[in-house]
């Protein structure tokens, strides 16, 4: 992500000046709270649209004003999109109330769509085996990247920030900067360590260099990781697309099936809230399915 731009500042001229000033105070509060750039950018986009289309001064805003805008916005939108919009507006209005720009909450809980909790998309044992076989056809860099993603559970946004000094190959650990710039230590497999060592031996190294480079010798970006993993899914002839986050979900389900506790998995994944990790406990692992079949037939 490009941290040089002022992504937390809105210059949208369609927003009345006083409302834009309050919006920028809100966005700055998120920046100072070390919220992820992606989060701030998404909230900014949603709030800019709302405040440019609903131009009532914030101190005069009513539930009717918000509902009128929301009903118009909702046409042909997915429930998850609507839920995100309401969450963004709610966070903004809570800030406005705390700063005394608004007297009361102008969003009603009943407006929230009911969204079924879908299970994370992960690879089964057989699919994972096919992916690992297919990965052997990739370049040494791509093999190292794939093994690192599957055995560390890192987000691709975390991998692109890694430098060589962040990784201890002998101890098979890496110091990762996660959401909110929180530092955590993750682990990776012995196989990953061997391939990673081979990959790094092909490069002239400085400790501050990125762990993974693209073919032009520049830092590998998130889109580059996406392309590698997507290509791997096609090589493995999977029935569904393979995405970088599937590697993270597969890591978590593999850990769970091997007996790891949810608090340990949460630490490895960088979840600050254990409830985020609990969704993996709802996934029927191979062992659970086998036990069921043995008992029930």
Image: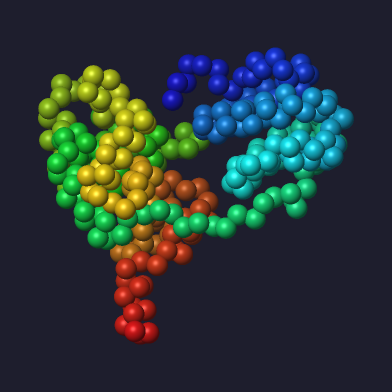
22 sits to left or right of 258: right
The image quadrant of residue 101 is: top right
The image quadrant of residue 18 is: top right
Q: How is the image coloured?
A: rainbow
Task: Identify which residue is drawn at 27% across, 39% down.
Answer: 231
Q: Say above or below: 28 vs 257.
A: above
Q: Nearer the viewer, residue 86 or 8?
A: 86
Q: Nearer the viewer, residue 173 or 15?
A: 15
Task: Identify which residue is drawn at 70% across, 14% down.
Answer: 13
Residue 30 appearing in the image? no
> Whole-percent x and y of residue 90?
71, 40
103 sits to left or right of 110: right
Quadrant location of the N terminus?
top left
The image quadrant of residue 28 is: top right
Task: Identify which residue is drawn at 36% across, 66% down.
Answer: 285
> Whole-percent x and y of residue 186?
33, 45
> Whole-percent x and y of residue 98?
77, 35
274 sits to left or right of 88: left
Quadrant location of the C terminus?
bottom left
Residue 283 appearing in the image? yes
> Whole-percent x and y of residue 77?
62, 42
Q: Say above or below: 180 vs 53.
A: below
Task: Identify which residue is drawn at 42% across, 63% down.
Answer: 283
153 sits to left or right of 76: left
Tally the numbered discs: 0
């Amino acid at each position: 992500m490009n941290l040089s731009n002022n992504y937390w500042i809105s210059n949208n001229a369609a927003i009345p000046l006083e409302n834009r000033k309050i919006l920028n105070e809100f966005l700055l509060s998120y920046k100072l709270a070390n919220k992820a750039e992606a989060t701030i950018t998404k909230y900014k986009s949603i709030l800019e649209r709302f405040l440019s289309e609903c131009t009532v001064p914030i101190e005069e805003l009513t539930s009717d004003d918000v509902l009128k805008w929301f009903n118009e916005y909702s046409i042909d939108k997915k429930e998850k999109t609507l839920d995100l919009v309401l969450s963004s507006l709610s966070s903004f209005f809570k800030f406005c109330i705390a700063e005394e720009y608004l007297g009361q909450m102008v969003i009603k809980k009943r407006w929230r769509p009911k969204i079924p909790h879908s299970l994370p998309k992960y690879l089964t044992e057989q699919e994972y085996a096919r992916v690992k076989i297919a990965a052997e056809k990739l370049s040494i860099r791509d093999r190292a990247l794939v093994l690192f993603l599957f055995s560390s559970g890192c987000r691709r946004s975390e991998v692109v920030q890694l430098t060589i000094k962040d990784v201890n190959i002998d101890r098979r650990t890496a110091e990762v900067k996660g959401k909110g710039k929180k530092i955590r230590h993750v682990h990776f497999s012995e196989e990953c360590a061997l391939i990673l060592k081979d990959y790094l031996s092909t490069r002239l190294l400085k400790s501050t260099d990125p762990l993974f480079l693209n073919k032009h010798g520049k830092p590998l970006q998130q889109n580059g990781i996406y392309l590698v993993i997507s290509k791997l899914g096609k090589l493995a002839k999977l029935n569904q697309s393979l995405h970088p986050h599937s590697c993270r979900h597969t890591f978590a389900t593999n850990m769970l099936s091997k007996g790891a506790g949810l608090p340990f998995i949460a630490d490895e994944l960088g979840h600050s809230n254990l409830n985020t990790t609990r969704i993996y406990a709802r996934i029927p692992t191979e062992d659970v399915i086998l036990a069921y079949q043995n008992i029930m037939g």
